[in-house]
Amino acid sequence: MTKRWPVQWFPTLLVCFLLVACSNQPNGAGSKEKDEISKQLGTVEKVSVLSTDGTEIPLDLQEFSTKIVEQGKPLQRAETPLAASDVKFTLIVYRTDLAPLVIEVGTKSSQLGDFAYSGEGAEAFYQWTRRMIGQSLFTHEGAYTMLLTADDQGSTHPLSQEESAFVWKSLQEAKYQEKLEQVVYPLYPYYRLKLDVGDRVLDATVLTPSLLSVRFGNEVLYYRVPGALFSQLTEWIPPHPIETDTFDALFKATKVQISASDKNGEASWVIAESIEGQGRAHQLVRLFKQGTLTNQPVQLPKQPVYTLEFQLQDSKERIDLNDKWFTYKGSIYAHRMIIDNVRHILAIATTKTEKTQK
């Protein structure tokens, strides 16, 4: 059972804790309360956010003080505390002559002192704080060292001071992306940047020529970046064909046809010929490369769960999927989660083109 107030303001709760004089039933915030909020925020010296892996970044104090006053949606106090596994990051408010205020933030609720709060206000507070993180991540003066890798090729390139300055400038020009409409997987050769900014190390993954992601503890933040950045990465580590195993040729596929057959009938999908579609096809190849070749006899069903056909320049390659197994070029590979993982990719990655009932 939860306790709910008709109108609730998260800033009011925050200020109550700043004053260390919060009742269990704070009232809605009007103009006078907002004036008091602004006044009490003057006692705040610094605000930072701590990720679940211990990375701390400062937030813009003026931006925080201005925007926190504008936050205000229904909130309720829950009887159960926020579970440690549900904490996305921790907001730390440093105050003059007072101990820091620590707020654990989850997607649906936040923990303030001994109480957890949920509702629209808590959800909005999570989104607002996440946006503040995204907008503050690259405000640092620069990075001490940077390392570029192309994971699919196994290539690395330590960036020079001049190259690092170019990358950092591009990141500072990046626009924080609130959310993605669908999952985006990295294109071959899977560029990643490791940025040592002194007090923390940031890991960025280049998903498309205009989109990259940065991991912040359990959170993943997305940014739209200038196209010149990707062009420069391809000069530092040019994409080139690799043949480390039998699956590498599939990275060059221009289209992937997926067929399925079960008691409900037959269906087929096509991964679209787009940048996002290519990334999904490349993710499928990475998944197959995780399989373990087996020489032991395996009794496979006559009808595979899925059949994937990769369209190459001069040929087509087929992979049949069964529970915990898949076959490619006459060989059998073991992969305990192959069906679940493929379904995860296909649930978002494909466009259904045909379905017929038996």
Image (tube, rainbow, N blue to C red):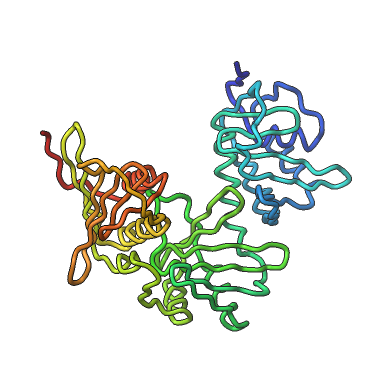
Q: Residue furthest right?
A: 97
Front residue of 47/1: it is 1
Pick the quarter of the image with the C terminus. Answer: top left
In the figure, residue 18 lies in which quadrant?
A: top right
Q: Where does residue 303 sit, x and y in percent of width and height?
A: 20, 42
Pick the quarter of the image with the N terminus. Answer: top right
Residue at (42, 56) in percent of width and height? 290
Position above or below: 237 against 21: below
Residue at (24, 65) in percent of width and height? 254
In the figure, residue 354 lies in which quadrant?
A: top left
Q: Where does residue 348 sit, x and y in percent of width and height?
A: 33, 47
Position above or below: 123 against 91: above
Residue at (59, 29) in percent of width and height? 118
Side of 346 relative to 130 (left or right): left
Q: Where does residue 264 sit, x and y in percent of width and height?
A: 19, 32
Is residue 32 visible to the viewer in this orientation of the structure?
no
Q: Residue furthest top?
A: 1
Is residue 72 visible to the viewer in this orientation of the structure?
yes
Image mark count: 0
Q: Where does residue 156 sit, x and y in percent of width and height?
A: 53, 75
Position above or below: 16 against 334: above
